[in-house]
Image (cartoon, grey):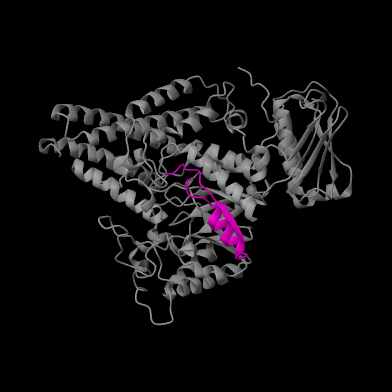
């Protein structure tokens, strides 16, 4: 099946595009021979001085490959390149007439984006080009993606290269690699993590160069206050914790040991050692030191403070000390906003040479109040929505789209530096990478040209340039699968009910204990988000099991009609099968858990045996898929552990059937 011409020719849609006649690209120019560049002025040629050797040849090969091998003319197809001082730094102009193709820009990055757009045109029209004029530049200076490599899932270098390529084609210009624990190979502390498979300094330097060649700023992202549980679990570092014995956030849940004591000189020493080893491997002028969710701060060692000392002052003093370390590396800092808005007096005292990252991942919570307040205080900020992939198995598509759109609107309205869409991996990265691809595409389009792309559907772009699916199945498939959560009729912050049921969070022995555990975590998640009092309880959910099963059946039938031709299409197909299988399994388990005190014992046993067999297949597939994209160390065991714990739960339930729960 051949693609029809899409409503867009360049993705993201440019700020202005005009065709030769009417509004369609009807006139065409032959463009089939070998491609050559003709720099028609010295300013344009000077761009090459900032690019690596062979960069231009590489770009020309990519353009020729986009034509799918169509070469019918022995004479070269010439692209004229001109310096245009009126183009914004990241902007460009493409002018295609029946006689020539001219690219204009005022910088190397503008030239690169013009080539990205031209490559899309050549892929749509191999052998010729439509006659048109496009003038383009981004709405937001920073258009970024954060990838979580800090919770056990560390992609291979090859997979990170592929991700950078995907994002560069979307004109994304910042990538942050979120790190906690031993996700980076700190040589000073290697003895404490002998079985890990972290990313190395050499690999970071290679990736940094690879990203720079594609005009992407690779930004280090290292925890330095909260989320330090992997370090604080080590006896040698536990004394640095705000609460070494841990504190339960909600009564009945396990205690947390996640936050450094900022008043302990050893905490600053640890942070300094981490940053001194990490930062020299990045050429970026920024570093995200996080400072988010210091959950125990002020509740442990710093609970009873002397007069004149506040927890805000302690936070601010430690921030200043860490930023001094950052400045010593000729970098500027970024921090998350959550603690600032819990202690708004900090907004008056923040250093000026930093950026605040304001995160919010729920569409029902608007970005507007925080964006307005940050703007009023003259604070540089970036708005940070999420992919909604984590803790969801398959994403939450409608929430994701509304969340990112709101962030783009408020970023433009209040003058944010940019938009950073976050892709987390809480509780073990159960989701596969394609779950997040629609979010990357929407975030790129809406942060580049919101007015022109507001109504755009990313499915066709994903089919053409990511999955290369001639049947137009996969782009829509991943978005629709991400809406399975609508059948749960439950509102849980950053999570789906089906994921919560499967995860190790809900360890239970009876039906009553099961529902109690679900609601404890419901309270925890919403207490952290500050939204608990405004939402219905989880017990009010009416899970539509039959509707969900029918929905998954239809999606699986649709999946069988794909015609993908991407390099890893077989793997993407198996990732789709795994995700459907996992969602279906979670729904079946939830239904059984609610029936434990109702069904007869033989029926329960039969269902548990079936679930055990089913889960064994899922776990085998999970480990197989994991090994293709990610490093193998204790991380794969950790992320498979959730499914293994569920297996153990099934065995326990089988053994305990004589008690007939509930």
Question: Picture coordinates of residue 285 (x, y %)?
Answer: 64, 61
Name the outermost residue toward the bottom.
307
Quarter placement of the N terminus: top right
Q: Residue at x 66, y 44 (%)?
A: 448
Residue 217 appears anywhere in the view: no
Magenta extent? 364-390
Of the pair 92 and 122, the residue shown nearer to us:
92
Give left or right: position of 140 versus 582: right
Residue 618 image-quadrant placement: top left
Q: Indicate whether 283 appears above or below 545.
A: below
Give left or right: position of 626 versus 408: left
Give left or right: position of 403 versus 189: right
Question: Picture coordinates of residue 133 (x, y %)?
Answer: 81, 35
Name the outermost residue toward the left.
658
Quarter placement of the C terminus: top left
Of the pair 396 and 144, the residue shown nearer to us:
396
Residue 226 image-quadrant placement: bottom left
Q: Indicate whether 357 appears above or below 143.
A: below
Question: Picture coordinates of residue 609 (x, y %)?
Answer: 22, 29
Residue 153: say if magenta: no
Name the outermost residue toward the top.
1
Residue 593 image-quadrant placement: top left
Q: Residue at x 56, y 61 (%)?
A: 373
């Amino acid at each position: 099946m051949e693609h029809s011409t899409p409503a867009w020719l360049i993705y993201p849609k440019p700020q202005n595009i005009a065709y030769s006649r009417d509004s369609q690209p009807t006139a065409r120019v032959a463009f089939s021979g070998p491609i050559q560049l003709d720099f028609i002025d010295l300013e344009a040629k000077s761009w090459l001085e900032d690019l690596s050797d062979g960069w231009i040849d590489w770009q020309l090969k990519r353009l020729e490959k986009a034509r799918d091998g169509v070469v019918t003319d022995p004479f070269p197809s010439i692209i004229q390149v001109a310096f245009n001082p009126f183009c914004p730094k990241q902007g460009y102009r493409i002018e295609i007439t029946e006689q020539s193709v001219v690219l204009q820009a005022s910088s190397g990055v503008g030239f690169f984006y013009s080539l990205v757009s031209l490559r899309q045109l050549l892929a749509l029209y191999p052998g010729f080009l439509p006659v048109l004029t496009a003038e383009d530049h981004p709405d937001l200076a920073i258009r970024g993606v954060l990838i979580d490599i800090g919770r056990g899932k560390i992609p291979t270098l090859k997979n990170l290269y592929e991700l950078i390529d995907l994002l560069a084609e979307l004109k994304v210009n910042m990538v942050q690699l979120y790190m906690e624990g031993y996700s980076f190979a700190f040589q000073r502390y290697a003895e404490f993590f002998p079985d890990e498979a972290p990313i190395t300094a050499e690999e970071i330097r290679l990736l940094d160069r690879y990203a720079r060649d594609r005009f992407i700023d690779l930004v280090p992202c290292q925890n330095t206050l909260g989320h330090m549980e992997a370090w604080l679990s080590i006896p040698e570092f536990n004394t640095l914790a705000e609460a070494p014995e841990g504190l339960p956030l909600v009564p009945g849940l396990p205690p947390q040991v996640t936050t450094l004591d900022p008043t302990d000189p050893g905490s600053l020493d640890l942070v300094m050692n981490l940053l001194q080893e990490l930062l020299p491997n990045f050429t970026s002028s920024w570093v995200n030191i996080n400072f988010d969710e210091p959950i125990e701060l002020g509740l442990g060692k710093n609970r009873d403070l002397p007069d004149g000392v506040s927890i805000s002052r302690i936070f601010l003093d430690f921030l200043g000390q860490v930023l001094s370390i950052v400045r010593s590396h000729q970098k500027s800092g970024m921090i998350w906003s959550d603690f600032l808005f819990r202690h708004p007096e900090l907004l008056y005292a923040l250093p000026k040479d930093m950026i605040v990252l304001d995160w919010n991942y729920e569409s029902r919570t608007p970005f507007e109040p925080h964006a307005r307040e940050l703007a009023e205080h003259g604070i540089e900020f970036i708005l940070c929505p999420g992919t909604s992939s984590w803790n969801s198995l398959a994403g939450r598509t409608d929430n994701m789209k509304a969340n990112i759109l709101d962030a783009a609107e408020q970023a433009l309205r209040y003058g944010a530096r940019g938009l950073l869409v976050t892709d987390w991996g809480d509780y073990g990265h159960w989701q596969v990478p394609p779950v997040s691809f629609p979010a990357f595409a929407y975030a790129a389009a809406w942060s580049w040209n919101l007015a022109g792309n507001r109504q755009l559907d990313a499915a066709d772009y994903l089919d053409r340039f990511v999955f290369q699916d001639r049947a137009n199945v996969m782009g829509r498939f991943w978005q629709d699968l991400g809406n399975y959560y609508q059948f749960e009729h439950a509102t849980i912050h950053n999570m789906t009910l089906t994921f919560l049921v499967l995860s190790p969070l809900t360890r239970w022995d009876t039906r009553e204990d099961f529902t109690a555990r679900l609601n404890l975590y419901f309270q925890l998640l919403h207490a952290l988000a500050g939204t608990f009092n405004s939402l219905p309880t989880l017990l009010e959910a009416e899970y539509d099991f039959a509707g969900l099963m029918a929905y998954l059946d239809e999606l699986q039938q649709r999946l069988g009609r794909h015609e993908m031709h991407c390099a890893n299409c077989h793997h993407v197909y198996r990732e789709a099968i795994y995700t459907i299988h996992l969602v279906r399994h979670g729904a079946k388990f939830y239904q059984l858990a609610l029936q434990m005190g109702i069904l007869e014992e033989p029926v329960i046993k039969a269902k548990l045996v079936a679930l055990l067999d089913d889960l064994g297949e899922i776990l085998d597939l999970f480990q197989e898929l994991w090994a293709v994209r990610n490093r193998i160390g204790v991380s794969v065991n950790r992320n498979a552990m959730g499914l293994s714990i569920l297996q153990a739960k099934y065995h326990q339930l089988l053994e305990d059937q004589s008690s007939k729960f509930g």
